[in-house]
């Protein structure tokens, strides 16, 4: 089965989750808790190319961990079912020029993966 993708968007240079982002997190938590007995979640934090590469890596990590913590905070996902990773600006969703901001890259991808034998 192919993973299901959700995204949480972020404002420029921010890692706090917006109300829209919390709705996405609540939807993911509901899906995982109600419909999937053996489900795993992989998070991948991204940034756009604005700012330094090292700061963007740190920002991508903070975004991924903010989503991780929010998902765990719902109380609907068992421990050990979420893996968080981040790419910073190295693996942009939309390739842009150097230092060019693009809101489509300021996201955390949430992949829901069913582990069905």
Image: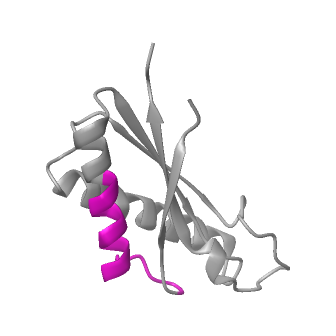
Outermost residue on the right side: it is 97
Outermost residue on the left side: it is 75
Please provide percent x and percent y for residue 47.
61, 71
Could you tell me which quadrant the N terminus lies in? Answer: top right
Please provide percent x and percent y for residue 80.
29, 33
12 lies above or below 2: below
Report if residue 18 is visible in the image.
no
Please provide percent x and percent y for residue 90.
72, 61
Please provide percent x and percent y for residue 15.
41, 76
3 lies above or below 64: above
> Which region shows up in magenta?
12-28
User: Which residue is depicted at the point 76% across and 70% down?
Assistant: 94
Q: Is residue 13 magenta?
A: yes
Report if residue 114 is visible in the image.
yes
Which image quadrant for residue 107?
bottom right
Could you tell me which quadrant the C terminus lies in? Answer: top left
User: Which residue is depicted at the point 36% across and 61% down?
Assistant: 67
Which image quadrant for residue 112?
top left
């Amino acid at each position: 089965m192919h993973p299901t993708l959700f995204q949480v968007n972020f404002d420029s240079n921010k890692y706090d989750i917006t109300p829209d982002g919390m709705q996405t997190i609540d939807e993911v938590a509901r899906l995982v808790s109600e419909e999937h007995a053996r489900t795993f979640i992989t998070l991948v934090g991204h940034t756009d190319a604005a700012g330094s590469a090292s700061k963007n890596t740190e920002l991508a990590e903070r975004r991924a961990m903010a989503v991780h913590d929010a998902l765990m905070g719902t109380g609907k996902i068992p421990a050990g079912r979420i893996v968080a990773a981040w790419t910073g600006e190295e693996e942009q969703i939309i390739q842009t020029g150097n230092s060019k901001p693009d809101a489509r890259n300021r996201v955390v991808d949430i992949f829901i993966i069913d582990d069905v034998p």
